[in-house]
Image (tube, coloured by chain):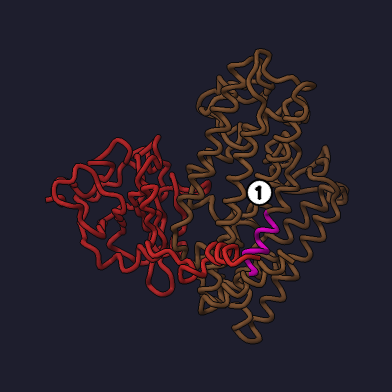
Chain colours: A brown, B red
Amino acid sequence: MRNTTLSVLAALSLAACGTPEEQALEGTRLTVDAQLAALESAARALQAAAPTPDADGWNASADAEALSQMKARWKEMRAAFERVEGAIAVLFPDLDASADGRYDDAVLTSPDTNLFDGQGFTGIHAVERILWSDAVPAAVTTFEQGLPGYAAPRFPGNEAEARAFKEGLLAKLVADCAAMRQQFAPLALDVGAAFRGVVGSMDEQAEKVDLGATGEEESRYARHTLADMRANLAGAQAFYAHFQPWVLSRGEQGKAADAAVLAGFEALSRAYAAQPGDSLPEVPADWSNQAPSQSALQTPYGQLWSAVQDATAVSKEGSLARALRQVASLLDIQEYAQ
Amino acid sequence: MSAHRVARVFAALGVLSGCGAPSSGGTDAGTAAFIAFKRDFADFLQWEPFQVEGAADHGGVHLAGARTVYLKERPPAGSAQWPMGTLLVKALDDRSVDPVTGEPPPLFAMVKRGGDFNADGAKGWEWFGLVMGTDGQPLIEWRGLGPPSGETYGASQQTCNGCHAAGGEDAVMSVKLSDVAR
Protein backbone atom coordinates (compact mmCIF):
# COMPACT_ATOMS: atom_id res chain seq x y z
CA MET A 1 0.00 0.00 0.00
CA ARG A 2 2.80 2.36 0.95
CA ASN A 3 4.59 1.73 -2.31
CA THR A 4 1.38 2.24 -4.25
CA THR A 5 0.77 5.53 -2.50
CA LEU A 6 4.28 6.71 -3.24
CA SER A 7 3.97 5.69 -6.87
CA VAL A 8 0.75 7.66 -7.22
CA LEU A 9 2.34 10.68 -5.58
CA ALA A 10 5.33 10.40 -7.88
CA ALA A 11 3.10 10.21 -10.93
CA LEU A 12 1.08 13.19 -9.71
CA SER A 13 4.19 15.21 -9.07
CA LEU A 14 5.57 14.55 -12.54
CA ALA A 15 2.23 15.25 -14.16
CA ALA A 16 2.36 18.66 -12.52
CA CYS A 17 5.66 19.47 -14.20
CA GLY A 18 4.33 20.70 -17.53
CA THR A 19 5.54 19.61 -20.94
CA PRO A 20 6.71 16.08 -21.71
CA GLU A 21 10.24 17.46 -22.05
CA GLU A 22 10.07 19.04 -18.60
CA GLN A 23 8.72 15.78 -17.19
CA ALA A 24 11.60 13.85 -18.73
CA LEU A 25 14.14 16.22 -17.21
CA GLU A 26 12.50 16.20 -13.81
CA GLY A 27 12.02 12.43 -13.78
CA THR A 28 15.66 11.91 -14.70
CA ARG A 29 16.78 14.26 -11.97
CA LEU A 30 14.65 12.51 -9.35
CA THR A 31 15.89 9.08 -10.42
CA VAL A 32 19.54 10.09 -10.18
CA ASP A 33 19.02 11.88 -6.90
CA ALA A 34 17.28 8.86 -5.36
CA GLN A 35 20.01 6.43 -6.41
CA LEU A 36 22.79 8.73 -5.23
CA ALA A 37 21.03 8.94 -1.88
CA ALA A 38 20.87 5.14 -1.76
CA LEU A 39 24.53 4.95 -2.73
CA GLU A 40 25.63 7.29 0.03
CA SER A 41 23.44 5.52 2.58
CA ALA A 42 24.90 2.11 1.69
CA ALA A 43 28.44 3.52 1.82
CA ARG A 44 27.85 4.84 5.32
CA ALA A 45 26.33 1.50 6.38
CA LEU A 46 29.33 -0.34 4.95
CA GLN A 47 31.68 1.86 6.94
CA ALA A 48 29.63 1.33 10.09
CA ALA A 49 29.78 -2.45 9.56
CA ALA A 50 33.59 -2.53 9.31
CA PRO A 51 35.10 -4.36 12.31
CA THR A 52 36.37 -2.28 15.20
CA PRO A 53 40.15 -2.20 14.80
CA ASP A 54 41.97 -4.63 17.06
CA ALA A 55 45.46 -6.06 17.27
CA ASP A 56 45.10 -8.86 14.72
CA GLY A 57 43.26 -6.80 12.10
CA TRP A 58 40.55 -8.97 10.60
CA ASN A 59 39.99 -12.61 11.20
CA ALA A 60 37.87 -14.43 8.64
CA SER A 61 36.25 -16.52 11.38
CA ALA A 62 35.80 -14.01 14.19
CA ASP A 63 34.78 -11.22 11.79
CA ALA A 64 32.62 -13.39 9.54
CA GLU A 65 29.41 -11.57 10.42
CA ALA A 66 30.98 -8.17 9.80
CA LEU A 67 32.37 -9.40 6.48
CA SER A 68 28.96 -10.68 5.46
CA GLN A 69 27.36 -7.34 6.37
CA MET A 70 29.99 -5.35 4.49
CA LYS A 71 29.59 -7.51 1.39
CA ALA A 72 25.81 -7.03 1.48
CA ARG A 73 26.18 -3.26 1.76
CA TRP A 74 28.77 -3.32 -1.05
CA LYS A 75 26.26 -5.03 -3.33
CA GLU A 76 23.67 -2.38 -2.45
CA MET A 77 26.18 0.27 -3.46
CA ARG A 78 26.77 -1.43 -6.79
CA ALA A 79 23.04 -1.67 -7.52
CA ALA A 80 22.54 2.04 -6.83
CA PHE A 81 25.62 3.27 -8.67
CA GLU A 82 25.27 1.13 -11.77
CA ARG A 83 21.70 2.31 -12.24
CA VAL A 84 22.88 5.89 -12.72
CA GLU A 85 26.55 5.72 -13.67
CA GLY A 86 25.71 6.11 -17.35
CA ALA A 87 24.18 9.48 -16.58
CA ILE A 88 26.63 10.91 -14.09
CA ALA A 89 30.11 9.55 -14.82
CA VAL A 90 30.67 12.10 -17.56
CA LEU A 91 29.58 14.94 -15.25
CA PHE A 92 31.88 13.87 -12.41
CA PRO A 93 34.93 12.30 -14.06
CA ASP A 94 37.17 12.96 -11.07
CA LEU A 95 34.76 11.48 -8.54
CA ASP A 96 33.95 8.59 -10.90
CA ALA A 97 37.65 7.73 -11.11
CA SER A 98 38.10 8.05 -7.37
CA ALA A 99 34.97 6.09 -6.45
CA ASP A 100 34.74 3.55 -9.28
CA GLY A 101 38.26 3.29 -10.71
CA ARG A 102 40.01 -0.01 -11.49
CA TYR A 103 43.20 -1.35 -9.96
CA ASP A 104 44.95 -1.51 -13.34
CA ASP A 105 44.30 2.20 -13.97
CA ALA A 106 45.25 3.25 -10.45
CA VAL A 107 48.67 1.57 -10.42
CA LEU A 108 49.55 2.62 -13.96
CA THR A 109 51.65 5.57 -12.80
CA SER A 110 52.64 4.53 -9.28
CA PRO A 111 52.07 1.51 -7.05
CA ASP A 112 49.52 1.57 -4.24
CA THR A 113 51.77 0.89 -1.27
CA ASN A 114 49.01 0.95 1.33
CA LEU A 115 45.87 -0.91 0.27
CA PHE A 116 43.84 0.39 3.19
CA ASP A 117 44.30 4.16 3.28
CA GLY A 118 42.44 6.73 1.24
CA GLN A 119 45.29 7.29 -1.22
CA GLY A 120 46.25 5.61 -4.48
CA PHE A 121 43.73 2.94 -5.45
CA THR A 122 40.47 4.02 -3.80
CA GLY A 123 36.77 3.52 -4.22
CA ILE A 124 34.28 0.75 -4.42
CA HIS A 125 36.57 -1.67 -6.28
CA ALA A 126 39.43 -1.06 -3.84
CA VAL A 127 37.03 -2.07 -1.08
CA GLU A 128 35.84 -5.05 -3.14
CA ARG A 129 39.44 -6.15 -3.66
CA ILE A 130 39.91 -6.38 0.11
CA LEU A 131 36.52 -7.84 1.04
CA TRP A 132 36.89 -10.70 -1.48
CA SER A 133 40.67 -10.98 -1.18
CA ASP A 134 40.45 -14.62 -0.09
CA ALA A 135 38.53 -15.62 -3.22
CA VAL A 136 40.04 -13.76 -6.16
CA PRO A 137 39.52 -15.65 -9.45
CA ALA A 138 42.74 -17.11 -10.88
CA ALA A 139 42.38 -15.23 -14.19
CA VAL A 140 42.17 -11.93 -12.30
CA THR A 141 45.29 -12.73 -10.27
CA THR A 142 47.14 -13.66 -13.45
CA PHE A 143 46.13 -10.40 -15.09
CA GLU A 144 46.99 -8.21 -12.10
CA GLN A 145 50.32 -9.89 -11.39
CA GLY A 146 51.46 -8.52 -14.72
CA LEU A 147 50.83 -4.94 -13.63
CA PRO A 148 53.69 -2.75 -12.41
CA GLY A 149 53.78 -2.48 -8.63
CA TYR A 150 51.30 -5.31 -8.12
CA ALA A 151 50.46 -5.96 -4.48
CA ALA A 152 48.38 -9.01 -3.60
CA PRO A 153 45.04 -8.16 -2.00
CA ARG A 154 44.49 -9.19 1.63
CA PHE A 155 42.53 -8.43 4.78
CA PRO A 156 43.88 -5.83 7.21
CA GLY A 157 46.56 -7.62 9.22
CA ASN A 158 46.85 -5.36 12.24
CA GLU A 159 45.06 -2.62 14.13
CA ALA A 160 46.58 0.19 12.08
CA GLU A 161 45.49 -1.40 8.78
CA ALA A 162 41.99 -2.12 10.10
CA ARG A 163 41.74 1.48 11.28
CA ALA A 164 43.03 2.78 7.94
CA PHE A 165 40.42 0.68 6.11
CA LYS A 166 37.56 2.09 8.18
CA GLU A 167 38.78 5.65 8.60
CA GLY A 168 40.80 6.01 5.40
CA LEU A 169 39.56 3.96 2.46
CA LEU A 170 35.91 3.77 3.55
CA ALA A 171 35.83 7.38 4.76
CA LYS A 172 37.12 8.48 1.36
CA LEU A 173 34.43 6.41 -0.38
CA VAL A 174 31.70 7.93 1.80
CA ALA A 175 33.05 11.43 1.10
CA ASP A 176 33.13 10.82 -2.66
CA CYS A 177 29.56 9.50 -2.68
CA ALA A 178 28.38 12.46 -0.61
CA ALA A 179 30.18 14.90 -2.91
CA MET A 180 28.54 13.38 -5.99
CA ARG A 181 25.12 13.72 -4.40
CA GLN A 182 25.76 17.29 -3.23
CA GLN A 183 27.12 18.42 -6.58
CA PHE A 184 24.32 16.77 -8.54
CA ALA A 185 21.44 18.09 -6.43
CA PRO A 186 21.37 21.69 -7.69
CA LEU A 187 22.10 20.93 -11.36
CA ALA A 188 19.58 21.85 -14.01
CA LEU A 189 20.21 19.09 -16.56
CA ASP A 190 19.56 19.81 -20.19
CA VAL A 191 17.88 17.28 -22.40
CA GLY A 192 21.13 15.97 -23.89
CA ALA A 193 22.60 15.35 -20.46
CA ALA A 194 19.39 13.67 -19.32
CA PHE A 195 19.13 11.38 -22.35
CA ARG A 196 22.70 10.34 -21.71
CA GLY A 197 21.24 8.38 -18.80
CA VAL A 198 19.69 6.01 -21.32
CA VAL A 199 22.52 5.89 -23.85
CA GLY A 200 25.33 5.83 -21.29
CA SER A 201 23.70 2.97 -19.38
CA MET A 202 23.68 0.90 -22.57
CA ASP A 203 27.32 1.75 -23.35
CA GLU A 204 28.29 0.58 -19.87
CA GLN A 205 27.00 -2.92 -20.62
CA ALA A 206 28.93 -3.24 -23.87
CA GLU A 207 32.15 -2.30 -22.12
CA LYS A 208 31.59 -4.67 -19.22
CA VAL A 209 30.96 -7.79 -21.27
CA ASP A 210 33.99 -7.08 -23.47
CA LEU A 211 36.34 -6.57 -20.53
CA GLY A 212 35.11 -9.83 -19.05
CA ALA A 213 37.23 -11.66 -21.59
CA THR A 214 40.51 -10.14 -20.43
CA GLY A 215 40.55 -10.37 -16.63
CA GLU A 216 39.83 -6.63 -16.57
CA GLU A 217 36.14 -7.04 -15.86
CA GLU A 218 34.60 -4.48 -13.60
CA SER A 219 33.50 -6.26 -10.41
CA ARG A 220 36.16 -8.89 -10.90
CA TYR A 221 36.85 -9.90 -7.27
CA ALA A 222 33.24 -10.37 -6.15
CA ARG A 223 32.27 -11.92 -9.50
CA HIS A 224 29.42 -9.44 -9.64
CA THR A 225 29.73 -7.98 -13.14
CA LEU A 226 26.57 -9.52 -14.56
CA ALA A 227 24.63 -8.06 -11.63
CA ASP A 228 26.20 -4.69 -12.51
CA MET A 229 25.00 -5.10 -16.08
CA ARG A 230 21.49 -5.93 -14.92
CA ALA A 231 21.56 -2.72 -12.87
CA ASN A 232 22.78 -0.79 -15.95
CA LEU A 233 19.85 -2.16 -17.91
CA ALA A 234 17.40 -1.34 -15.13
CA GLY A 235 18.83 2.17 -15.09
CA ALA A 236 18.45 2.57 -18.85
CA GLN A 237 14.84 1.40 -18.62
CA ALA A 238 14.09 3.75 -15.73
CA PHE A 239 15.60 6.73 -17.56
CA TYR A 240 13.79 5.85 -20.78
CA ALA A 241 10.48 5.65 -18.92
CA HIS A 242 10.79 9.36 -18.19
CA PHE A 243 11.13 10.09 -21.92
CA GLN A 244 8.43 7.66 -23.03
CA PRO A 245 5.45 10.08 -22.77
CA TRP A 246 7.39 12.58 -24.85
CA VAL A 247 8.15 9.91 -27.47
CA LEU A 248 4.53 8.79 -27.58
CA SER A 249 3.42 12.39 -28.06
CA ARG A 250 5.05 12.28 -31.51
CA GLY A 251 2.25 10.34 -33.23
CA GLU A 252 2.73 7.13 -35.20
CA GLN A 253 6.47 7.66 -35.56
CA GLY A 254 6.69 7.97 -31.82
CA LYS A 255 4.70 4.79 -31.25
CA ALA A 256 6.91 2.87 -33.67
CA ALA A 257 10.11 4.19 -32.11
CA ASP A 258 8.84 3.40 -28.62
CA ALA A 259 7.89 -0.13 -29.64
CA ALA A 260 11.39 -0.71 -31.04
CA VAL A 261 13.02 0.52 -27.84
CA LEU A 262 10.77 -1.61 -25.61
CA ALA A 263 11.43 -4.67 -27.78
CA GLY A 264 15.17 -4.08 -27.43
CA PHE A 265 14.94 -3.79 -23.67
CA GLU A 266 12.84 -6.95 -23.51
CA ALA A 267 15.29 -8.97 -25.62
CA LEU A 268 18.24 -7.95 -23.46
CA SER A 269 16.28 -8.58 -20.26
CA ARG A 270 15.55 -12.13 -21.47
CA ALA A 271 19.22 -12.70 -22.24
CA TYR A 272 20.23 -11.57 -18.75
CA ALA A 273 17.49 -13.62 -17.11
CA ALA A 274 18.75 -16.72 -18.92
CA GLN A 275 22.08 -16.48 -17.08
CA PRO A 276 22.16 -17.68 -13.48
CA GLY A 277 23.91 -15.83 -10.68
CA ASP A 278 25.72 -12.50 -10.53
CA SER A 279 28.89 -13.31 -12.45
CA LEU A 280 29.69 -13.34 -16.13
CA PRO A 281 29.70 -16.86 -17.57
CA GLU A 282 33.05 -18.55 -18.06
CA VAL A 283 34.85 -17.15 -21.09
CA PRO A 284 35.75 -19.80 -23.71
CA ALA A 285 39.49 -20.48 -23.95
CA ASP A 286 39.59 -19.57 -27.65
CA TRP A 287 37.48 -16.42 -27.30
CA SER A 288 38.12 -13.50 -29.63
CA ASN A 289 36.04 -10.34 -29.53
CA GLN A 290 37.04 -9.58 -33.11
CA ALA A 291 36.23 -12.95 -34.62
CA PRO A 292 34.54 -15.32 -32.18
CA SER A 293 34.18 -18.87 -33.44
CA GLN A 294 30.76 -20.41 -33.93
CA SER A 295 31.39 -22.85 -31.11
CA ALA A 296 32.42 -20.02 -28.79
CA LEU A 297 29.27 -18.10 -29.66
CA GLN A 298 27.19 -21.10 -28.56
CA THR A 299 28.58 -21.00 -25.02
CA PRO A 300 26.72 -19.07 -22.30
CA TYR A 301 29.34 -16.29 -22.49
CA GLY A 302 29.08 -16.19 -26.26
CA GLN A 303 25.31 -15.97 -26.12
CA LEU A 304 25.45 -13.18 -23.57
CA TRP A 305 28.09 -11.30 -25.57
CA SER A 306 26.00 -11.64 -28.73
CA ALA A 307 22.88 -10.35 -26.99
CA VAL A 308 24.74 -7.30 -25.72
CA GLN A 309 26.31 -6.69 -29.13
CA ASP A 310 22.92 -6.98 -30.80
CA ALA A 311 21.53 -4.39 -28.39
CA THR A 312 24.36 -1.87 -28.28
CA ALA A 313 25.79 -1.74 -31.81
CA VAL A 314 24.57 1.53 -33.32
CA SER A 315 25.59 0.33 -36.77
CA LYS A 316 23.38 -2.76 -36.51
CA GLU A 317 19.96 -2.47 -38.11
CA GLY A 318 17.27 -3.21 -35.55
CA SER A 319 19.51 -2.78 -32.51
CA LEU A 320 18.32 -1.10 -29.35
CA ALA A 321 21.09 1.47 -29.73
CA ARG A 322 19.82 2.30 -33.23
CA ALA A 323 16.25 2.60 -31.89
CA LEU A 324 17.46 5.01 -29.20
CA ARG A 325 19.11 7.14 -31.90
CA GLN A 326 15.79 7.18 -33.72
CA VAL A 327 14.14 8.41 -30.55
CA ALA A 328 16.80 11.10 -30.20
CA SER A 329 16.16 12.20 -33.79
CA LEU A 330 12.44 12.31 -33.19
CA LEU A 331 12.89 14.47 -30.09
CA ASP A 332 15.66 16.56 -31.71
CA ILE A 333 18.20 15.58 -29.09
CA GLN A 334 21.05 16.37 -31.44
CA GLU A 335 23.80 14.89 -29.29
CA TYR A 336 22.45 11.40 -29.95
CA ALA A 337 20.45 11.83 -33.15
CA GLN A 338 21.30 9.75 -36.19
CA MET B 1 0.29 8.21 5.96
CA SER B 2 0.41 11.34 8.11
CA ALA B 3 0.15 14.84 6.73
CA HIS B 4 3.76 15.44 7.68
CA ARG B 5 4.83 12.27 5.89
CA VAL B 6 2.90 13.30 2.77
CA ALA B 7 4.53 16.73 2.88
CA ARG B 8 7.97 15.17 3.17
CA VAL B 9 7.29 12.86 0.25
CA PHE B 10 6.03 15.70 -1.92
CA ALA B 11 9.02 17.78 -0.95
CA ALA B 12 11.30 14.93 -1.92
CA LEU B 13 9.51 14.63 -5.22
CA GLY B 14 9.99 18.29 -5.89
CA VAL B 15 6.33 19.24 -5.87
CA LEU B 16 6.74 21.89 -3.22
CA SER B 17 9.53 23.61 -5.09
CA GLY B 18 7.96 24.09 -8.50
CA CYS B 19 8.94 20.66 -9.84
CA GLY B 20 12.25 21.01 -8.09
CA ALA B 21 13.91 22.54 -11.10
CA PRO B 22 17.10 24.10 -9.82
CA SER B 23 17.38 27.76 -10.65
CA SER B 24 21.11 28.01 -10.55
CA GLY B 25 22.00 26.81 -14.03
CA GLY B 26 25.19 24.85 -13.76
CA THR B 27 26.41 26.48 -10.61
CA ASP B 28 26.49 24.72 -7.30
CA ALA B 29 27.09 27.40 -4.75
CA GLY B 30 27.10 24.93 -1.89
CA THR B 31 30.06 22.92 -3.09
CA ALA B 32 31.77 25.56 -5.20
CA ALA B 33 31.55 23.93 -8.60
CA PHE B 34 30.33 25.16 -11.97
CA ILE B 35 29.18 22.30 -14.19
CA ALA B 36 28.55 23.56 -17.70
CA PHE B 37 25.88 22.31 -20.07
CA LYS B 38 25.12 22.92 -23.75
CA ARG B 39 23.16 26.08 -22.99
CA ASP B 40 26.23 27.69 -21.43
CA PHE B 41 28.03 27.66 -24.81
CA ALA B 42 25.10 29.08 -26.79
CA ASP B 43 25.95 31.94 -29.18
CA PHE B 44 29.63 31.76 -28.31
CA LEU B 45 30.48 33.48 -31.60
CA GLN B 46 28.90 36.59 -30.07
CA TRP B 47 31.26 36.51 -27.07
CA GLU B 48 34.29 38.79 -26.82
CA PRO B 49 36.81 37.60 -29.43
CA PHE B 50 40.58 37.44 -28.99
CA GLN B 51 42.60 36.75 -32.09
CA VAL B 52 45.32 34.27 -31.27
CA GLU B 53 48.68 35.81 -32.06
CA GLY B 54 50.53 33.93 -34.79
CA ALA B 55 49.35 30.71 -36.30
CA ALA B 56 51.73 28.36 -34.52
CA ASP B 57 50.14 25.03 -33.78
CA HIS B 58 51.97 24.33 -30.51
CA GLY B 59 54.03 21.53 -31.99
CA GLY B 60 51.17 19.43 -33.23
CA VAL B 61 48.50 19.87 -35.79
CA HIS B 62 45.60 20.89 -33.58
CA LEU B 63 43.83 23.98 -34.73
CA ALA B 64 46.60 24.98 -37.15
CA GLY B 65 45.69 28.22 -38.85
CA ALA B 66 44.22 31.57 -37.83
CA ARG B 67 42.00 31.11 -34.83
CA THR B 68 40.03 33.05 -32.29
CA VAL B 69 39.35 32.50 -28.62
CA TYR B 70 35.95 33.67 -27.40
CA LEU B 71 35.56 34.74 -23.77
CA LYS B 72 32.05 34.72 -22.34
CA GLU B 73 32.62 37.20 -19.54
CA ARG B 74 35.59 39.17 -18.33
CA PRO B 75 36.75 38.51 -14.78
CA PRO B 76 36.33 41.18 -12.11
CA ALA B 77 39.01 43.85 -12.07
CA GLY B 78 42.12 42.81 -10.22
CA SER B 79 41.43 39.08 -10.42
CA ALA B 80 44.55 37.03 -9.85
CA GLN B 81 42.84 33.90 -11.16
CA TRP B 82 40.03 33.25 -13.61
CA PRO B 83 36.81 33.03 -11.59
CA MET B 84 34.65 29.92 -11.37
CA GLY B 85 32.23 29.92 -14.28
CA THR B 86 34.70 31.36 -16.80
CA LEU B 87 34.07 29.93 -20.28
CA LEU B 88 36.44 30.14 -23.26
CA VAL B 89 35.92 28.58 -26.69
CA LYS B 90 38.68 28.27 -29.29
CA ALA B 91 37.69 28.08 -32.94
CA LEU B 92 39.42 28.22 -36.29
CA ASP B 93 38.46 31.32 -38.22
CA ASP B 94 38.00 29.19 -41.32
CA ARG B 95 34.91 27.11 -40.46
CA SER B 96 34.68 25.34 -43.80
CA VAL B 97 34.43 21.57 -43.72
CA ASP B 98 37.37 19.27 -44.31
CA PRO B 99 37.21 18.22 -47.97
CA VAL B 100 38.31 14.69 -47.09
CA THR B 101 36.26 13.92 -44.00
CA GLY B 102 33.37 16.27 -44.62
CA GLU B 103 33.65 17.31 -40.99
CA PRO B 104 33.79 20.90 -39.76
CA PRO B 105 36.93 21.87 -37.84
CA PRO B 106 36.82 20.99 -34.16
CA LEU B 107 35.99 23.41 -31.38
CA PHE B 108 37.62 23.25 -27.99
CA ALA B 109 36.56 24.87 -24.76
CA MET B 110 37.78 25.25 -21.22
CA VAL B 111 35.53 26.03 -18.29
CA LYS B 112 36.59 27.03 -14.79
CA ARG B 113 34.69 24.46 -12.78
CA GLY B 114 36.41 25.38 -9.54
CA GLY B 115 37.27 23.50 -6.38
CA ASP B 116 39.68 20.59 -6.54
CA PHE B 117 38.54 19.46 -9.97
CA ASN B 118 41.48 18.38 -12.17
CA ALA B 119 43.77 18.82 -9.16
CA ASP B 120 46.61 16.93 -10.87
CA GLY B 121 46.44 19.08 -14.01
CA ALA B 122 45.21 22.60 -14.68
CA LYS B 123 43.48 22.85 -11.34
CA GLY B 124 39.83 23.81 -11.48
CA TRP B 125 39.55 23.64 -15.28
CA GLU B 126 37.39 21.21 -17.26
CA TRP B 127 38.09 20.52 -20.96
CA PHE B 128 35.48 20.21 -23.68
CA GLY B 129 35.27 19.14 -27.29
CA LEU B 130 32.35 20.81 -29.08
CA VAL B 131 30.68 20.31 -32.44
CA MET B 132 28.20 22.56 -34.17
CA GLY B 133 24.64 21.29 -34.18
CA THR B 134 22.21 21.68 -37.03
CA ASP B 135 20.72 24.69 -35.27
CA GLY B 136 24.04 26.53 -35.37
CA GLN B 137 24.63 26.06 -31.68
CA PRO B 138 27.47 23.98 -30.23
CA LEU B 139 26.92 20.52 -28.78
CA ILE B 140 29.16 18.91 -26.17
CA GLU B 141 30.99 16.04 -27.86
CA TRP B 142 33.20 15.19 -24.89
CA ARG B 143 34.14 16.72 -21.56
CA GLY B 144 36.24 16.04 -18.52
CA LEU B 145 39.90 15.82 -17.58
CA GLY B 146 40.86 15.36 -21.22
CA PRO B 147 39.62 13.79 -24.42
CA PRO B 148 38.16 10.29 -24.09
CA SER B 149 39.96 7.31 -25.52
CA GLY B 150 39.89 7.56 -29.29
CA GLU B 151 39.62 11.35 -29.28
CA THR B 152 42.58 13.70 -29.30
CA TYR B 153 43.21 17.39 -28.97
CA GLY B 154 42.81 17.98 -32.65
CA ALA B 155 45.04 15.49 -34.41
CA SER B 156 47.97 16.00 -32.03
CA GLN B 157 49.00 13.62 -29.27
CA GLN B 158 49.16 16.47 -26.77
CA THR B 159 46.89 16.37 -23.77
CA CYS B 160 44.98 19.40 -22.59
CA ASN B 161 46.69 19.34 -19.20
CA GLY B 162 50.06 18.69 -20.81
CA CYS B 163 50.20 22.22 -22.19
CA HIS B 164 47.76 24.22 -20.09
CA ALA B 165 48.71 23.04 -16.60
CA ALA B 166 51.97 24.92 -16.72
CA GLY B 167 51.09 27.53 -19.31
CA GLY B 168 49.63 31.00 -19.44
CA GLU B 169 48.03 32.76 -16.52
CA ASP B 170 45.98 30.27 -14.49
CA ALA B 171 46.20 27.83 -17.41
CA VAL B 172 44.75 30.16 -20.06
CA MET B 173 47.33 30.65 -22.81
CA SER B 174 45.62 32.77 -25.44
CA VAL B 175 44.01 35.53 -23.38
CA LYS B 176 46.06 37.44 -20.84
CA LEU B 177 44.25 37.60 -17.51
CA SER B 178 46.15 40.73 -16.58
CA ASP B 179 44.83 42.46 -19.72
CA VAL B 180 41.17 41.65 -19.24
CA ALA B 181 40.91 41.82 -15.44
CA ARG B 182 41.14 45.56 -15.13
Left or right, A303 with respect to B102, comes to: right
Q: Quadrant of the N terminus of chain A?
A: bottom right
Q: Quadrant of the C terminus of chain A?
A: bottom right
Amino acid identity at mark 1: Glu
Left or right, B7 with respect to A267, comes to: left
Can residue A154 be seen from the camera position used here?
yes
Q: Is residue B49 shown above or below A298?
A: below
* Magenta-drawn segment: A232-241
Verify whether residue A236 appears in magenta. Answer: yes
Identified at 53% across, 40% down, the residue is: A97
Q: Looking at the rendering, which quadrant does residue B158 occupy?
A: top left
- Residue identifier under label 1: A207
Q: Which chain contains the residue that carries disc 1?
A: A
Identified at 30% across, 47% down, the residue is: B57
Residue B160 coordinates in the image, percent (x, y): 38, 43
Verify whether residue A43 appears in magenta. Answer: no
Q: Looking at the rendering, which quadrant does residue A200 occupy?
A: bottom right
Q: Toward the viewer: A122 or A294?
A: A122
Look at the magenta stretch and give its main secondary structure: helix
- Secondary structure under tag 1 reads helix
Residue A89 coordinates in the image, percent (x, y): 54, 50
Identified at 34% across, 46% down, the residue is: B114
Q: Toward the viewer: A259 or A18?
A: A18
Q: How many marks?
A: 1
Residue A316 coordinates in the image, percent (x, y): 69, 65
**In the image as oriented, which residue stretches furthest toward the bottom?**
A251
